[in-house]
Image (cartoon, helix red, strand yellow):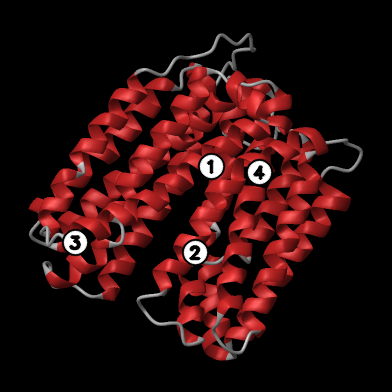
Amino acid sequence: MLSGLRQLPRTVWLIGLISLVNDAASEMLYPLIPLYLASVLMAGPRVLGVIEGIAEATASLLKLFSGVIVDRTRRTKPWIVFGYGLAGLGRPLIAFVGSWPWLLAIRFADRVGKGLRTSPRDALLAAWVPAERRGLAFGLHRALDNAGAVVGPLVAAALLALHMPLQDIFLWSIVPALLCLGLALALREPQIAAPEPRTIDWHLAGMPPVFKRYLVVIALFTLGNSSNMFLLLRAQELGVAAATVPLLWAAVSVVAMVFSTPLSALSDRFGRRRLLVGGYTAYGLFYLALGGIGHDGPQLFALFAFYGLFLAATEGVEKALVADLAPVERRGTAFGWFNLTAGVLLLPASLIFGWLWQTWSSGVAFAFSAACALLAGVLMQVWVLRGRKT
């Protein structure tokens, strides 16, 4: 694996470094927004729900749009630069807002940036590596992204410990934003010989049947993949102290960071199907265990670390499989549909999970999610990739 990492193109490492810097800046501020909303803007949870709901829905829809446009123009860099620039340069402006609608506008711009850059970035990453190294490349990207998710909250905690005002922390986020923008400007487009589509085509009709089956399984799995906030809520329900809850999530990010690259690289050697089936099965077992456990303790940290293994085994492999199944000339559109499917269903997934929890019990909600994951694993094994060796 180490020799494979050294042989990865410079652009692959650059994309990963950009994600690390951007995610560190984003995760540094994200936990502070609810605090800023309540203590400075005097708004409550309902407003937070409106802001995040609109922001995330916008990002999901734009991921398809940007993927389709990339296939038509054959250019990814402008969308990546604009997407990171819009998000990064907008975050420091939070320090100057005086009411929640302005905060909504900034979060909206941040998610617009994410929506415009995600599918082009995935397409660019896939274009720079051969099929036999896609798992390694996407795994490295997820590892660096998860590293940013570890660094960001630690930086925020350190700055708060130094009694830095919230407004100043938001202003300092301009530094990683400028670094991220500079790195994005250094990206290079690959030279790929692919047919030029005659018109903009966002439809699934021309996609291979195997790719459509894959999207069905992604939709089923995502329907059971509710917000991770429910995992932390369950930990609190089991008696975990509020100060310890962030440590649980930090354990997830650390495990995902360490194992994303080696586990995703295994899919290059042993096939994507095995990693995804194993990952979906691990997710189902994790949810069954978390829903059935009766109290907190060391086993809870072990369970959350196990969840980090699921993330490591699936996040990069899922995207590598998109690149495997999609035609080269429609790769951006394929990533757009994948990101749209995984993003749009997060809202109903969380609504269903919350309704099951409140109406019956947390155990029923976790059992539903586990059932979706285990069924997705079965379909991935016997239906999606039937007749293929991958």
Residue 263 percent across, percent down from the top left: 68, 44
Q: Determine which residue is flagged by label 4.
A: 318
From the viewer's perspective, is the residue at label 1 or at label 2 nearer? Answer: 1
Q: Are the residues at dot 1 and dot 4 in contact (C-beta closer than 8 Å)?
A: no
Q: In terms of image quadrants, where is residue 178?
A: top left
- Quadrant of the drawing holding the N terminus: top right
Q: Which mark is residue 142?
A: 1
Q: Residue at x 68, y 60 (%)?
A: 220
Q: Determine which residue is flagged by label 3.
A: 160
Q: Determine which residue is flagged by label 2.
A: 347
Label 1 vs 2, first from the N-terminus: 1
In space, the residues marked 1 and 4 are separated at their CA atoms by: 11 Å
Q: Are the residues at dot 2 and dot 4 in contact (C-beta closer than 8 Å)?
A: no
Local secondary structure at mark 2:
helix
In space, the residues marked 2 and 4 are separated at their CA atoms by: 20 Å
Label 2 vs 3, first from the N-terminus: 3
Amino acid type, label 4: Glu
Q: Is residue 200 visible?
A: no
Amino acid type, label 3: Leu
From the viewer's perspective, is the residue at label 4 or at label 3 nearer? Answer: 3
Name the one closer to the observer, 130 or 158.
158
Residue 18 percent across, percent down from the top left: 39, 32
Q: Residue at x 75, y 62 (%)?
A: 281
Amino acid type, label 1: Arg
Q: Residue at x 74, y 39 (%)?
A: 266
